[in-house]
Amino acid sequence: MAKVVLYTFAIFKEPNEHEQNDGFHERNPFVYVSAENAKGFVDRSGNSWKRNHADRNSNWGTREVSPRFFTGESHRDTAATLSVWEDVESIYAFCYHGFHAEVLTHRHEWFVEGEWPAFVAWWTPDDVTPTRTEGAKRLEHLHDHGPTAYAFNFKGPFDADGNPLHMDREKIQERSKIIESQLRRE
């Protein structure tokens, strides 16, 4: 069965270790735990040992890969994630509810406002591990061509068969309630 991959990308306004980014780094553990506990979450880069896929850890790709929007001359550091989910609705619920949604409200404090997409999604066979290089290429494709079955966003999602997807709003609401309940417990 196919899984959907999410690659996120942002460029810090200041170097990664700068105190201006402390709020972002302090929130990361909560966001990661929230993702790992979200219904529909499968795995994320840097987390394979928890998911019984020890061989995946080295196959997610080097962290040094970035889309062409990152230039060493005008930018210092980036933040990028790569995760695998069961469906688009689960990703949407996670992104816009709970800890991750709270982080999004502060993104302008830490990251450059870009003319590129902040994320890209695509479907992959269950037995294929996505890489950061693939994520960077698909983000560039989304920027250049808009949403396609190859690289899409929430405004133009596709299903695993390559057809335009009408997201199941009830599924999003159900999964959002679970995520919001986690936020209240913390």
Image (cartoon, rainbow, N blue to C red):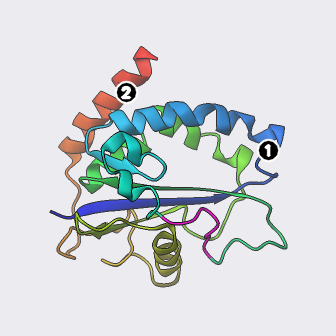
Element on which disc 1 rests: loop
Image point (41%, 59%), residue name: 6
The N terminus - image quarter: bottom left
Element on which disc 2 rests: helix
Where does the magenta region start and end? Answer: 61-67
Amino acid on which the number 1 mark rests in the picture = Glu
Name the residue tied to disc 2: 180
Image point (75%, 74%), residue name: 71
Image point (60%, 74%), residue name: 67
| Depth check, front residue: 143 or 5 | 5
Residue 55 occupies which quadrant of the picture? bottom left
Instruction: Verify whether residue 65 appears in magenta.
Output: yes
Name the residue tied to disc 1: 17
> Which x, y percent locates residue 114?
67, 65
Q: Tell me: 67 left or right of 97.
A: right
Residue 39 occupies which quadrant of the picture? top left
| Depth check, front residue: 168 or 85 | 85
Amino acid on which the number 2 mark rests in the picture = Glu
Furthest residue toward top: 185
> Which x, y percent locates residue 135?
47, 69
Q: Tell me: 79 left or right of 47.
A: right
